[in-house]
């Protein structure tokens, strides 16, 4: 196994050297590069073809000499030979540089940030945590944050789900950070280009864009209305899911990755920060203002004391300004804000917390895992309940609810909600938290004269995230509407790449970046006890993360991660689908001797 001390960047540099040597050798004699890099079969095949390409013109020359004339057919054959040889020559050279092309594992394919999941999981399996962390940060600098709160779309498609539970990919990401012992192998970036970029909004998307711009050698000024960076991650997501020291670790990592990064708080776009001036002073601007304006319910009594918007409530929870409860707290809504508010209300002393949602469980936009955690802690959920009005003298005392019914419109069409006549009831409450949705601040967006769609969302080019203003790019929740951290991170990276090509236009930029972007070989193929080294990997239950449901506290993490060396055990369940493509054997869980989850 190669030394575990080498950083991923160093490993990549060595690999690039090896591949360049292979390219030069193959340009000298097609196939030589493949032989030099140990790809014997393909190298020999290329040498045989080389011999064929040399013998053919020799034979042709003999025919021409015998016939003593060049017919049209001979010219055509020469032309065909030339074109075929040219194509072959460049393809073999390209192949020598690119090396073996592996499949994309499903986990990586479905990760919006395209994190190299299977390699970091294998590095954790080998106990090489610092390298695993570096590999994750190559695509997602908010690694520790994602290790806690990412909804992990990768786990839904993990090949293991065909026979058992998926690999605990998110928990392993967390493990990589926790066990790297503060040892980071990521390098410091230097400012290489004279152009300057401004980023407005220091949430997940803005911070990621800053990191990737710094990596590409730009100096970046980042502005935010808040005094501290982090966006929703620091102002709204409760500490029992995302401890602030974890977030701080990620933010410090980003802001200290280059001397060219400067954060300025207290700058509000549209008030003391002007987009026109930014365009004038900077070479490009990235806007990532998020979508954190609460939508009101617009029903009677919403102005009563004790009716609190969910986002404001969570903000107070994060700053420690929220007052405690002692009775029944009703939470209205079915998204993450509603579920987080309900869990926070329980921790603030509420005797009973009920979440009321207009539709049914399968329609809830909140993450399934988080809903399950809330229920374990004691939050009750009532479905098909719509608030009609809030009642009380000065303070809210009760909520009047109406029963709803779903009318099915058949396949592919969203079922419609209708009120059930005569079914109404009161719920006595101490407070109501309203979390029925959030959106971008459209009033500000309108003033910025950025083209928007019919719903008011900013219109950007899907590939390079550019708006109708030449120098202005936008991404994250502001463009997508309320989404996820990993999508915001992916937008930040995409925008950084687009801004780089905008500022320094290059010939066929994307194609050449694709060629230069390959995964180094970590030498992980033989690892004792790893599933991928077995011909018929055993069915092994997923290692469970430690939890703390019994004593929930506002500042105590509920999910505590994998303990001891159980992370290595869990990581060894991975099948390294990109290399072995064992997925085909697991299709529908039909491999002999295995039972799919539904069959067990
Ligand atoms: C309660 C809750 C729970 C969530 N839980 C999860 C979860 O578990 N997992 C997950 O993946 N996602 C979760 N999300 C979603 C996730 O937080 C967001 O998708 C993500 O943070 C969006 O990042 P962003 O950078 O686009 O926007 P934001 O984080 O909103 O950042 C926008 C930044 O722009 C600044 N800004 C806004 N307007 C201006 C202005 N005019 N001038 C200057 N600065 C401005 C803001 O201060 C802010 O710092 C949750 C969201 C909420 C509300
Ligand atoms: S088994 Fe491993 S490589 Fe395959 S999808 Fe799951 S995590 Fe990815």
Image (cartoon, rainbow, N blue to C red):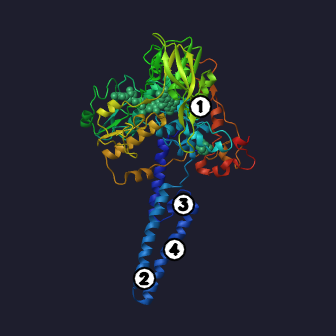
Instruction: Specify the quarter for ligand 2.
Output: top right
Q: Which residue has dot 1 on it?
A: 369
Whether the residue under disc 1 has CB within 8 Å of ligand 1 = no
Instruction: Farthest residue to the right: give it.
Output: 593
Q: Which residue has dot 4 on it?
A: 52
Question: Left or right: 354 with respect to 15?
Answer: right
Hey, which quadrant is residue 219 in on the image?
top left
Nearest to N terminus: mark 1 or mark 4: 4
| Quadrant of the rendering where the N terminus is positioned | top right
- Nearest the viewer among 467 and 199 is 467
Rendering coords of residue 147 (x, y %) = 54, 32
Nearest to N terminus: mark 2 or mark 4: 4
* Alpha carbons under labels 1 and 2: distance apart: 70 Å
Badge 2 marks a residue whose secondary structure is helix
Badge 1 marks a residue whose secondary structure is helix
Badge 4 marks a residue whose secondary structure is helix
Nearest to N terminus: mark 4 or mark 3: 3
Residue at horizontal 43%, vertical 24%? 298
* Alpha carbons under labels 4 and 3: distance apart: 18 Å
Q: Which mark is residue 35?
A: 3
- Graded by Cα atoms within 10 Å as few (under 14), some (14 to 19) or many (20 or more), the crowding at tag 4 reads few
Q: Which residue has dot 2 on it?
A: 74
Q: Nearer the viewer, mark 4 or mark 3?
A: 4
Nearest to N terminus: mark 1 or mark 2: 2
Whether the residue under disc 3 has CB within 8 Å of ligand 2 = no
Q: Nearer the viewer, mark 1 or mark 2?
A: 1
- Nearest the viewer among 78 and 20 is 78
């Amino acid at each position: 196994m190669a030394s575990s001390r080498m950083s991923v960047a160093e490993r990549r540099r060595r690999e690039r050297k090896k591949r360049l040597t292979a390219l030069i050798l193959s340009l000298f004699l097609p196939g030589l590069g493949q032989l030099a890099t140990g790809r014997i079969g393909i190298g020999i095949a290329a040498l045989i073809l080389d011999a064929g390409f040399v013998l053919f013109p020799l034979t042709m020359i003999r025919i021409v000499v015998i016939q003593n004339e060049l017919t049209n057919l001979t010219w055509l054959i020469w032309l065909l030979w030339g074109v075929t040889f040219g194509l072959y020559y460049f393809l073999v050279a390209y192949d020598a540089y690119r090396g073996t092309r592996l499949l994309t594992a499903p986990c990586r394919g479905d990760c919006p940030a395209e994190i190299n999941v299977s390699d970091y999981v294998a590095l954790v399996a080998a106990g090489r945590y610092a390298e695993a962390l570096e590999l994750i940060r190559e695509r997602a600098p908010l690694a520790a944050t994602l290790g806690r709160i990412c909804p992990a779309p990768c786990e839904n498609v993990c090949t293991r789900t065909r026979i058992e539970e998926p690999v605990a990919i998110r928990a392993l990401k967390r493990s990589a950070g926790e066990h790297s012992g503060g040892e980071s192998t990521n390098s410091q970036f230097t400012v290489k280009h004279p152009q300057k970029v401004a980023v407005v909004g220091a949430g997940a998307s803005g911070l990621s864009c800053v990191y990737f711009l710094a990596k590409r050698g730009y100096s970046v000024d980042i502005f935010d209305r808040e005094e501290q960076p982090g966006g929703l991650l620091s102002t709204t997501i409760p500490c029992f899911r995302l401890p602030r020291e974890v977030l701080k670790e990620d933010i410090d990592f980003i802001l200290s990755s280059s001397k060219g990064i400067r954060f300025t708080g207290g700058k509000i776009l549209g008030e003391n920060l002007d987009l026109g001036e930014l365009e004038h002073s900077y070479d490009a601007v990235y806007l990532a203002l998020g979508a954190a304006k609460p939508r009101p319910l617009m029903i009677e009594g919403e102005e009563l004391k004790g009716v609190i918007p969910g986002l404001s409530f969570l903000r107070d929870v994060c700053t420690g300004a929220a007052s405690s409860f002692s009775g029944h707290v009703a939470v209205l809504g079915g998204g993450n804000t509603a579920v987080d508010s309900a869990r926070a209300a329980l921790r603030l002393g509420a005797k009973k917390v009920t979440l009321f949602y207009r539709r049914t469980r399968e329609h809830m936009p909140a993450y399934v895992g988080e809903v399950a955690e809330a229920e374990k802690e004691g939050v009750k959920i009532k479905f098909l309940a719509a608030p009609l009005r809030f009642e009380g003298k000065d303070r809210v005392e009760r909520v009047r609810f109406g029963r709803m019914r779903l009318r099915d419109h058949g396949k592919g069409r969203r079922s419609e909600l209708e009120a059930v006549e005569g079914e109404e009831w009161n719920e006595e409450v101490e407070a109501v938290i309203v979390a029925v949705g959030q959106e971008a601040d459209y009033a500000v967006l309108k003033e910025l004269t950025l083209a928007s769609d019919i719903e008011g969302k900013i219109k950007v080019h899907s590939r390079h995230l550019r708006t109708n203003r030449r120098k202005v790019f936008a991404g994250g929740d502001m463009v997508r509407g309320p989404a996820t951290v990993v999508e915001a991170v992916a937008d930040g990276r995409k925008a950084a790449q687009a801004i780089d090509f905008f500022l320094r236009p290059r010939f066929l930029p994307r194609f050449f970046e694709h060629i230069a972007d390959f995964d180094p070989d970590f030498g992980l193929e033989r690892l004792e006890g790893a599933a991928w080294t077995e011909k018929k990997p055993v069915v092994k239950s997923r290692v469970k993360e430690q939890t703390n449901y019994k004593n929930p506290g506002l500042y105590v993490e509920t999910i505590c991660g994998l303990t001891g060396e159980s992370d290595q055990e869990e990581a060894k369940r991975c099948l390294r689908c990109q290399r072995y493509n064992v997925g085909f054997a697991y299709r529908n869980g039909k491999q002999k001797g295995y039972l799919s989850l539904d069959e067990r």
